[in-house]
Amino acid sequence: MKKENGISRRSFLKSSALAGALGAIGTGSTMGVLTSCGGGEGAANANKPLKQPGEYYIPELPDMAADGKELKAGVIGCGGRGSGAAFNFLNAANGVTITALGDTFQERVDDLAKKLKDEKGIDVPADHRFVGLEAYKQVIDSGVDVVIVATPPLFRPVHFQYATEKGKHAFLEKPICVDPVGYRTIMATAKQAQAKNLCVVTGTQRHHQRSYVESYKKIMEGLIGEITGGIVYWNQNMLWYRERQAGWNDCEYMIKDWVNWKWLSGDHIVEQHVHNIDVFTWFSGLKPVKAVGFGSRQRRLTGDQYDNFSVDFTMENGIHLHSMCRQIDGCANNVSEFIQGTKGSWDSSTMEIKDLAGNVIWKYDSEAEKANFKQTDPYTLEHVNWINCIRQGKPIMQATETAVSNMAAIMGRESAYSGAETTWDQMTASQLDYTPKDLNLGKMDMSGFVVAVPGKPIDKK
């Protein structure tokens, strides 16, 4: 996904001229592609680590996974992201292939099958191409070793649950749930997957993006001090949409336009902005205890979602995170994260750490990364790590931490929809379930798919 330049956050810092010249340093590992600006070794050693090395997870990110056991994958959800993830998987290692495909619609299965044959020489036979709402079971039961789950988000908890029951390693695209019922399914299934020593990686690809991983390490080393708050953004033009075509039934139409329907996508605060919220929950190690938000619908052409959200999260230790996301054409765009600490701040739009005087004391060197690595795509690197964990017998479980950021986004969404404050305890125990009661590939009751209106109407006198 394309990074946009962030807006100025100088109000957080005291203005000062940039001190010192940039000079490259190495860390003595394959991740040593950083730049340091001023401060010196003595200043760095004076920082109190937030966590000690070994207390937090750092993935190994070589260009490709090590050779090992051959792996057969099944792809569940053959649209744009599913097709992308399929090729990310194939590009991440030798000795991997795709042997089964499943989707709600025949044309999507056939399109991906053709692309695999044309570009990779992989021929998925017709009897391993499955269609319909139950196609996920047929893919998982077809003899695959691993599954790539890239269906619309509502379906992912159930697909993960079945894959785990069958003992399959899983890659789950984000978000991994859209409501509290799905959240609890994910958390319960994650425990079962851990008990079976399965490897589960999620599509929060910043966890496998070297610039973010190195930034995380520097913050854990204490370079910005104790975290005191942050702001996260996903402001962009409106995403794609599909107008209903003659002959499409209700369910077909909504699934083909899924990114605009809250029951399928969770709304864009969950479907996309979860990335940015996830960066803060990952770096801080905190979950929100309450959220107060608002939003509105102004420009969207289909579906029942909002165009924008603004949420104030109160975290476990009392610090605040401000979350902002918008999808409207012709507005200021910004996809980034900013974290403030007692000694400085980190800004993902520049991949810099500044001290309280505004001096750059660390900067990620992307040019050095390009010089040292052939593979710099985090979408592929997450599959590199997943395959390495499987082949090395090192179980990994990312679903639980992704579920935290996912639930935070759900809290913000429900607060904006209702106008009420939401809490972690309230939402994680809620019976809210977005799954339509009459879900089927045919006619459905469309009267329930309405845009939320917060608060109470004005009393008429």
Image: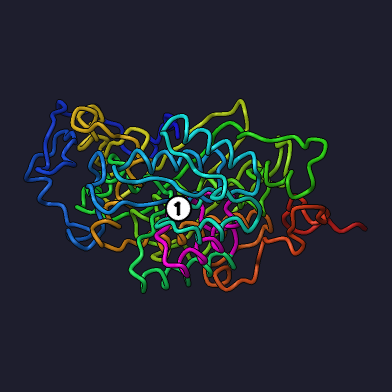
Residue 338 in percent (x, y) is at 38, 43
Quadrant in the rendering for residue 248 = top right
Residue 429's x, y, as percent? 57, 73
* Number of residues whose C-alpha sits closer than 10 Å to that of mark 1, classed few (under 14), some (14–19) or many (20 or more): many
Q: Is residue 325 magenta?
A: no
* Residue segment shown in magenta: 150-179
Give above or below for 157 relative to 69: below
Is 178 contained in the magenta span? yes
- Front residue of 233 and 378: 378
Q: Quadrant of residue 455?
A: bottom right
Q: Which residue is mark 1?
A: 321
Residue drawn at the location 26% of the way across and 51% of the way down: 59
Identify the residue shown where x is 52% and y is 44%. Answer: 125
- Residue 358 vertical placement versus 17 (above, below): below
- Quadrant for the C terminus in the image: bottom right
Q: The residue under label 1 is which amino acid type?
A: Leu
Q: Is residue 248 visible?
A: yes
Taking the image as shown, residue 71 lies to the left or right of residue 403, namely: left
